Each structure stands twice: as C-alpha cells, then as structure tokens.
Image (cartoon, rainbow, N blue to C red):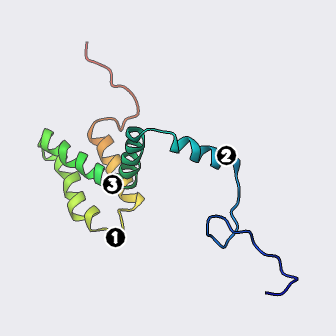
Amino acid sequence: MPSGSPRLPQTRGSPCRRLRIPELEEAELFAEGQGRALRLLRAVYQCVAAHSELLCYFIIILNHMVTASAGSLVLPVLVFLWAMLSIPRPSKRFWMTAIVFTEVGRGRGGGGARPTAP
C-alpha cells in the first residue's frame, strides 16, 4: 500500500468503516435488553407482517366456512384461482377488488348508516 493513501480502521474483523448513529446504537442496546418472550413476540409479529397475504387467505376461507353462502364463495374462488397463482404475490389491484367486493357485499358501499324502519 502506498504511504499516501489513508487506511480504514477495522472494527470487529471487518475491513470496512462503520457509520456510527447514536440513535441506532441506543435502539440495539434497548432490543438486547428485552426478555426472550418479548423478542419472540416481536419475531412472530414480523413474520406475520412479512406473510400477511397468507393470513388474509386464511381469514377469507374461514369467513366462507362460517357463512357458507353463494355470495361468500366469490372470495375463496378468487383466492384459489388468482391470488395463489400470482408470482410473487397478488397485485394491489387484486386486494382492492377484494376489499370493494367485501364492502359492497356487506352493504357498506352506500357510505352511511342505513335508517331503520319505524
């Protein structure tokens, strides 16, 4: 190495320089101080958040099992014929269509509360 070029400091066996951000260091120390149960809950939450489409599929199928009507059959058919075949995952348009269908099917498409008969 030429004498004029600067050397990067090594940290923990790594040849590259580490950027020090105090807030991140505090967050890492806070996370390390948490108990196992809380870290497990956080890991489960992150897993569910990363695979939220599977949770949605389960809820759609559970809804059809509970209601068992022809109207609720549309969403499971959409799930099995479109959503599970989409690579890597269903588009935003699919989820918007499913939400709109659910809202209209439940009678909430009108935008307000329906008046009750006297």
Mark 2 or 1: the one toward you: 2
Amino acid type, residue under disc 1 in the picture? Ile
- Left or right of 77, for residue 14: right
Q: Residue at x 13, y 47 (%)?
A: 70
Expressed as whole percent of the image width and height from the top left, the position of residue 54 reads 29, 54
Q: Secondary structure at mark 1?
A: loop
Expressed as whole percent of the image width and height from the top left, the position of residue 117 reads 25, 17
- Left or right of 70, for residue 75: right
- Left or right of 23, for residue 49: left
Q: Residue at x 40, y 48 (%)?
A: 43
**Residue 87, labelled with which disc?**
1
Query: Residue 118 or 4: which is nearer the viewer?
Result: 4
- Left or right of 78, for residue 94: right
**Residue 53, labelled with which disc?**
3
Mark 3 or 2: the one toward you: 2
Q: Secondary structure at mark 3?
A: helix
| Residue farthest toward the top in the current orientation of the protein | 118
As measured in the structure, the alpha-carbon distance from the residue carrying label 1 to the one carrying label 3 is 12 Å
